[in-house]
Amino acid sequence: MTTDRDDPALRAAVPSLAARAYFDPLAHERELQRIWRRHWICAGRTEEIARAREFRQFRIADHGVLLLRDEQGGLRAFLDSCRHRGASLCASERGRLARAAIVCPYHAWTYDLQGRLLRTGAQHPPVGFDRDAHGLRPLPVREWNGFVFCCLDPDPPPFDAGFDQPLERLDAWRLGDCLSVHRTILTIACNWKVFWENYNECLHCPGVHPELARLVPAYGRGLLEARDDPDWRGRAAAGDPSAGDGLRPGARSWTTTGEPIGPEFPGLGDADRHAGHVYVTALPSLFVVGHVDYARAVRLRPLGPETTELRVDYLVPRETCAAAGFDPAPAIAFAERVLGEDAAICETNQRGLRAAPEARGTLLPEEYAVRAFHAWLRAEGAVD
């Protein structure tokens, strides 16, 4: 999230959202309607549906979606509901169609890969039945950097509207040519907003993430960036090693050793190499962190008012994956430890919110990105 750190309003404490916004079923339904059913949602990786006729099913805000690759290589998305009596269109979550047709497993209504109804299987077709009016309901779909996005709204917002940086910011990582070498699926007992709030501040980092705090000096001081310290220039001039952005001296990546797990991406600039991590956020469902040697993609979706699913992919160039002796374990182990710490503290946060349903917390100046997240929710009409 971006914001103006020089805004005088950010020097004061302000109220957070009402606690009930994090567990009330009506509040949750409002968010599904205003956010999850209206915005572009990351549904997975392109490599999962790379070949013609490959498909996978996905759920967004209680709606089933069928994603598939047509014979010409185009990506298609439909509501996963047969126009006959509403059955799910495939009997398995993922796979490859035997032929260029979608056949409902219930009554064999058959559609082509563009969603047009071909046949109903009825022995006595209804008089005046219009097959053209009974095709599958298409959804907007888009590919970006090897990720698949779709939207339940047939008139979606601009694709880049949810991104906090230009769409080309991660081009040097060639993420479309990377493979996922490991995936973690985690269910957290917290509201989805709790997770995003935790992501958007680092006041918790010194106490919750001791190893991460040692790796990233700014995080060890509770800062998202070193320049969030009002005296960062003075500290830098005095040679304070914790005053700069980037990793601790000698470290190059987010791994248990600080060493990369493979060759560095060749197209990175000096600033990105020095930083050791570049974040790109695509609200409400994805953030990607580019390191010098790999990238981490974290997808989330709400499973209920107080339950959130995370899917984490570790993305590595194909040629690195194929190299003899390649071992991603140091990167996975480090990131999994940080993720586990975040999950535990988010659940702690969620438990405490129920104690005073109408109460509001307090945001401090360093939580400017949390404030920006709340402003986005209000602008979307999702919260009061």
Image (cartoon, rainbow, N blue to C red):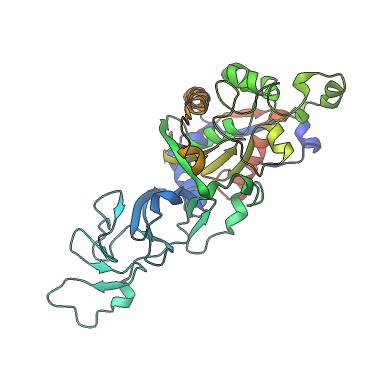
- Residue 360's image quarter? top right
- Quadrant of the frame with the C terminus: top right
Res. 368 visible in picture: no
Residue at position x 45%, y 51% in the image: 46
- Looking at the image, which is closer to me, 2 or 47? 47
- Looking at the image, which is closer to me, 318 or 333? 318
Residue at position x 72%, y 30% in the image: 225
Tell me if 272 is positioned left or right of 340 in this view: right
Tell me if 227 is positioned left or right of 308 in this view: right
Tell me if 49 is positioned left or right of 172 in this view: left
Res. 159 visible in picture: yes
- Looking at the image, which is closer to me, 282 or 19? 282
Tell me if 206 is positioned left or right of 102 in this view: right
Q: Give the vertical position of 291 relative to 57 (above or below).
A: above
- Quadrant of the frame with the N terminus: top right
Q: Give the vertical position of 205 relative to 120 (above or below).
A: above
Residue at position x 56%, y 43% in the image: 383
- Residue 266's image quarter? top right
Q: Position of residue 381 (x, y in %)?
A: 57, 50
Q: Give the vertical position of 175 relative to 97 (above or below).
A: above
Total marks placed? 0
- Looking at the image, which is closer to me, 304 or 345? 345
Q: Position of residue 253 (x, y in %)?
A: 61, 28
Q: Position of residue 88 (x, y in %)?
A: 27, 55
Q: Residue furthest left?
A: 123
Q: Give the vertical position of 15 relative to 138 (above or below).
A: above
Q: Position of residue 92 (x, y in %)?
A: 26, 49
Q: Residue furthest front?
A: 324
